[in-house]
Structures are given as C-alpha cells and as structure tokens.
Image (cartoon, rainbow, N blue to C red):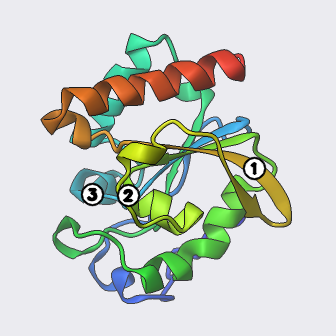
Amino acid sequence: MISPDKDCRLCALCEGRTNLVLPSGDLESPVVLVGEAPGENEDLQGAPFVGRAGQILNQAMADVGLERSRVMITNTVKCRPPANRDPEQSEMAACRKYLDSELAGRKAVIGLGKSAIRDLLGYEGSLAPIINTRQYIEVCGERILFIPTYHPMACVYRKAAREELRKTLAMVKEEFGL
C-alpha cells in the first residue's frame, strides 16, 4: 500500500487540510469500506469516519455484530474538501493511485455513498436501483467485488437507507467470515 507524502500537493485540497486522513482498521482485511471524503473531525484526527458519520457507521456495524477492527476503512480522497462539499473528479483522480493501492488484492469493496460509487464504479444515476447489488470493478488488473450502499449520513434522514446499510454490512460479515 502506498500513502501520500505528508506534504502532498497533488490537488488544491492540501491547502485547507490539517491532517492527511489515511486508512484505519485492519489494513490486511479482505473487505474495504470506502467513503467519499474526510469531514472536519476526520481532518482534525487524521482518521476516517470518526465524526457523526462514523458514529452512525459504528452503530450499524454493532447492530449486525461486525467489529470495525475487522475491516479497512478509507476515503476516495485523503484531504477534507472545503465546507464538506463532495470531492471533485480531479481531486479523486489525484488520490486514485493511493486508493487503488489500498484496494488491490481485496475480496470486496463497499462503496459508501454517491461520490465513492461514482469514483469507483463510474455510475452517476440514482443510487436506489444499485444499492446492495453485486458489481465488479477492476483495480490494478484484478476484478474485485463492489457493493454500493448508502453513506452513513443518508441514514440520518432516511430509515430505509439505515436498513440497507445494515443489510450490506450483515451480508459482508456473513460472506467473508468477519
């Protein structure tokens, strides 16, 4: 796995960051959860999903008996976009070599939300028709299972999104013996 240099300047996101936000959890796990971008708390702590979205994700994982320490968690970009906006294509492209190195050799990638799904699957439509479907992505010449699901913050506003996220996590736990 390769990580950006602490002084990375590949895109403009570096200008507002406090910390690079690198993967956490089991870095050797067969399963990786990929979110869109760090938020304020993630930027301050240098770890993914430690703010409100992280609390929601932790609860969904606990609900299905999946320990956070059993999966790797990362984002499409390693720096916080201004005002928590979605990362731009150019910003995701700048971090793509790092993300690809994180995903290489995995059995499954779970895309959390529209930005991660767009970046990894190239899908730009409504999420509802593809949630919890088995897709495949190519990473470093390997075909890897990709399961799109809702971002934890979508669960704040939609009970159905919370249920789908839990369903995704339960499926992954069962299929990969986590």
Q: Could you say where residue 148 lies in the image, as x and y percent from the top left?
A: 50, 45
Point out the frontmost of discs 3 and 1.
Answer: 1
Q: Is residue 133 above or below residue 5?
A: above
Element type where label 3 sits in the image: loop
Task: Report the residue at 84% width, 58% height from top.
Answer: 142
- Viewer-nearest residue: 51 or 117: 117
Q: Is residue 105 above or below residue 26?
A: below
Q: Across the whole image, how many numbered discs are drawn on residues?
A: 3
Residue that label 2 marks:
114
Q: Residues within 10 Å of mark 1 (few under 14, many from 20)?
A: some
- Viewer-nearest residue: 155 or 7: 155
Q: Could you say where residue 140 lies in the image, as x and y percent from the top left?
A: 81, 66
- Which residue type carries mark 1? Ile
Element type where label 2 sits in the image: helix
Q: Left of 160 or right of it: where is 99?
A: right
| Image quadrant where residue 177 sits | top right
Residue that label 3 marks:
39
